[in-house]
Amino acid sequence: MGDLDQFGLLLGAVILAFGLRRDRDQVMELIQRERKAYDELHESEARYRAVFRSLAFPAFVAAEDGEILEANQAVQELTGLRDAALIGKSLANILQPPGLWENLRHELERTGYVRAEASLDRATGETRILDVQCGTIRLSGQKAFVVLMRDLTDEREAERQRYLLSQAVQQMWDKLCIADSTGRPQYANEAALRSHPSLMQSNFLDTLLASTDAEPERVWDEVRSGGIWRKELVRQSEDGRRVYEDVMVSPVRIESTGERFYLAICRDVTEKRRLEHQLVQSQKMEAVGSLAAGLAHEFNNLLGGILGYVSFLKQDTPPDSPTYPDLIALEQVVHRAADFTRQLLGFARQSSEREEVFSLNEVVRSVVNLLKHTLSSSIRVELDLQPDVPLVHGDPAQIQQAVLNLCLNACDAMPEGGELLLSTRRVERGGQVGVRLVVADTGIGMDEETLSRIFEPFFSTKPRGKGTGLGLSTTYSIVKRHGGTIDVESKLGEGTVFEVEFPAADDETGRSETERSLAEAAEALSATVLVVDDEPAVLNVAQRALQRAGFRVLTASSGDEAMALFTRTDGVVKVALVDVLLPDGNGRDLAYRMAELFPDVRIILHSGYSGEEDTSEKLPQVISFLRKPVDPERLVAEVRKALELV
């Protein structure tokens, strides 16, 4: 072997040795890199798990088939289940509705990401609404899914409440507007836009306070200083009606931004004002009624005395005497005065003389028949009576008077002629059935001042001597007495409409009282009658009339005096004529005391009032009621009837 060959062999050995060493170094380096990568991967997975478990929002890691591999602490809090109860479960059994997970998985296979809304039932049975986001990852070399969830339940509930509030505000009857610091509207509900279509294009106060006496600048000064401005305003509607509004303007500050807005709320209180006015009117009428009743009572006492003395003078005066016609005329004047006080009592007092169930349609027809002979030919009467209206309960004579008053009032408002309409309808309010009567005319109408006073006693727009001013006030009283309501609408030149409503009767059987049939009483010269009244003229007339008829008469001017006489005579008194109102008590109480002491006594009550008749129904001994003034002939006849029952 030559030197060259030996050198080559040596060189090859050296090269081989060097190459082997290099491969070993490379292998070692490769191993170190793999170990480092594994350590880094292990560290990365550890970090991932630490981050995953500490996420504030719920998160799952699931295998490709949906089996839960990991669940963080937030998931456990959301579901109410421990980690051990979750691992191994399928997402298909957790996320609702059924079939949702399969749809999500197919979309994940296609795009690698999907987002949807789902629900989840907690261990407590409560359902939570979730925003679910899913993505594809690789875990330990295997394909997996990460599922992130956000609980929307509270947010959706807040949205629902906000929507409910917005709908309530939008649909409320009150007008509501919110404006910025310059007065430019930012929001207005439907009611505000209905009343003011251009509200959003103008200053809100200028629009809302238009046609009222409020000054927008003064309102601004109040609310910009932090105060609340509130006032009841009156505006004229497009159809000419007066509309009352309760208006409130207040500042609203947004705490998070410091912005300031202004809220205006306008509430229509027209109906409230109408009801308040009706209540005040009713109270005023009640007070005036009490006064009128007292005056009528005293006046009737005086008329009773005058009528009695006139009757005595007539009896003592020959018919051919020159003074006899004067006595007749005087008697007629007294009767006219008595009719006037009867109207006062009809307005003032409360009871009906004859109550029964009757048809309002029949009453209306009877009134029209009465009017036929008195109405001008230039006034046309139209009837529109619903056939099946319910019956009403009360005194048909008084209802007839009320309807007649309304008709006469309507006719007086049409001096040049016109149309009078009477209609009836069945109505129902709050489950209560009733009957509505409308009396409408095409007459001259009324202004607001007249309209506000039409039910006042003695108020009249008729010429002097043409009316007493008691027609409509009496109508008002009759309607109220029967549990009804009465409203009126009128404008100058446009006629007047009265609407009267009565409650329906509870049943359809009449309740009119059965009248007693009494034969003419025989003379009872030995009978003693006790007359009790605090008015000397009434006592004198009654005593003279009864004595002329052959009765023995005792008189007393007070309850105590009467009871003393009644007790002392020990049953001699067969009939007692008792005034209802006495200076020391009530005549009804006196009647009870007399009846208790001597049950055979017969008692006749008399009064200038109209509301005491009910005593005869409660006490058998009270056999009749006389309303003052009573002429002597009727007084004697009533005593004779009473004696027939003894």
Image (spheres, rainbow, N blue to C red):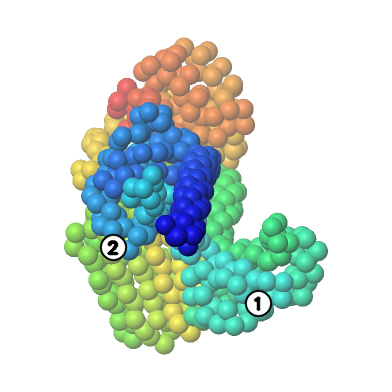
Give the x, y percent position of residue 61. Answer: 39, 44
CA separation, marks 2 and 1? 52 Å
Q: Is residue 345 above or below residue 273?
A: above
Q: Is residue 471 visible?
A: no
Q: For residue 585, which quarter of the picture?
A: top right
Q: Is residue 508 above or below residue 211?
A: above
Q: For residue 527, which quarter of the picture?
A: top left
Count of labels in the image: 2
Front residue of this view, candidates 496 and 515: 496
Secondary element type, mark 1: loop
Q: Earlier in the sequence, mark 2 or mark 1?
A: 2
Front residue of this view, candidates 164 and 37: 37
Numbered mark located on residue 184 in the image: 1
Q: Disc 2 marks which amino acid?
A: Arg
Q: For residue 218, which quarter of the picture?
A: bottom right
Secondary element type, mark 2: helix
Determine the residue positioned at 29% across, 30% down: 522
Residue tagged 2: 110
